[in-house]
Amino acid sequence: PGQKIAMVKYKPATTERPLKIISGGQIGADQMGLRIGKSLGIETGGHAPKGFRVSSPDLKRNAKDPSLKEKYGLVEHPEWNYLGRTLANVQNSDGTIIIATNWSSGGTKATQRFIKQEGKPSLLSTDINSPEDVIKWMTENNIRTINIAGNRSITEEHPALKHIYDALKTL
């Protein structure tokens, strides 16, 4: 009685920039997502396979990229294979954006399986035709931590990446 209650204007989380963009650090879509985050001043991170394993640029051998820790804040997952870090990134995000041209790749299939298993929302690059598509998905699902995953062959020319960048820039 007699106390004043401070009124705080409600601002939905989805009108703010994401708190974090995470990925597994693989070349292609994963690293493109991390670059978008860094360029916009959004915190980045995620789990990478043991040894910070990635594919070589020619996709013919395994390589290690420990600079992912310094550049993007990734942590090393205890498993060498990609499945452990894929599951961890799905679990540690509010939702996953998958950027792919090859929907039958093992990694893309595993990511989709883990999304379903964990009951997390996802947005496919085939459904991203404008920045508004990304914003709508984030708003409807209260997305604050985004896992960006997809094919190794994805380059910065993929149209979904520009829409993701433009969407996050406006938030």
Image (tube, rainbow, N blue to C red):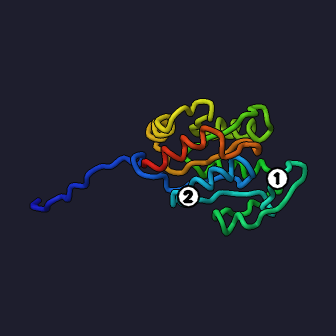
> In the rendered view, would you say 108 is above or below 79?
above
Of 154 and 72, the residue lying toward us: 154
Q: Is residue 83 left or right of residue 42?
A: right
- Within the image, what quadrant is residue 96 found in? top right
* Residue at 20% over, 59% down: 6
Q: Residue furthest left?
A: 2
Q: Decide: few, some or many residues near mark 2? Use Cα within 10 Å; few <14, some 14-19, many ≥20.
A: few
Q: CA distance from mark 2 to mark 1?
A: 22 Å
Which three-letter amino acid code belongs to the residue tagged 2? Ser
> In the rendered view, would you say 168 is above or below 99?
below
* Residue at 70% over, 47% down: 87
Q: Is residue 135 left or right of residue 118?
A: left
Q: Residue furthest right?
A: 60
**Quadrant housing the N terminus:** bottom left
How far from the left and from the top, in percent, is residue 53? 81, 58
CB of mark 2 within 8 Å of CB of mark 1? no
How far from the left and from the top, in percent, is residue 92? 60, 52
Which three-letter amino acid code belongs to the residue tagged 1? Pro
Tag count = 2
* Residue at 70% over, 53% down: 24
Of 26 and 59, the residue lying toward us: 59
Q: SS for tag 1? A: loop
Q: SS for tag 2? A: helix
Q: Is residue 35 left or right of residue 136?
A: right
Q: Give the number of the disc on residue 39.
A: 2
Residue on which disc 1 sits:
57
How far from the left and from the top, in percent, is residue 47? 69, 57
* Residue at 50% over, 45% down: 166
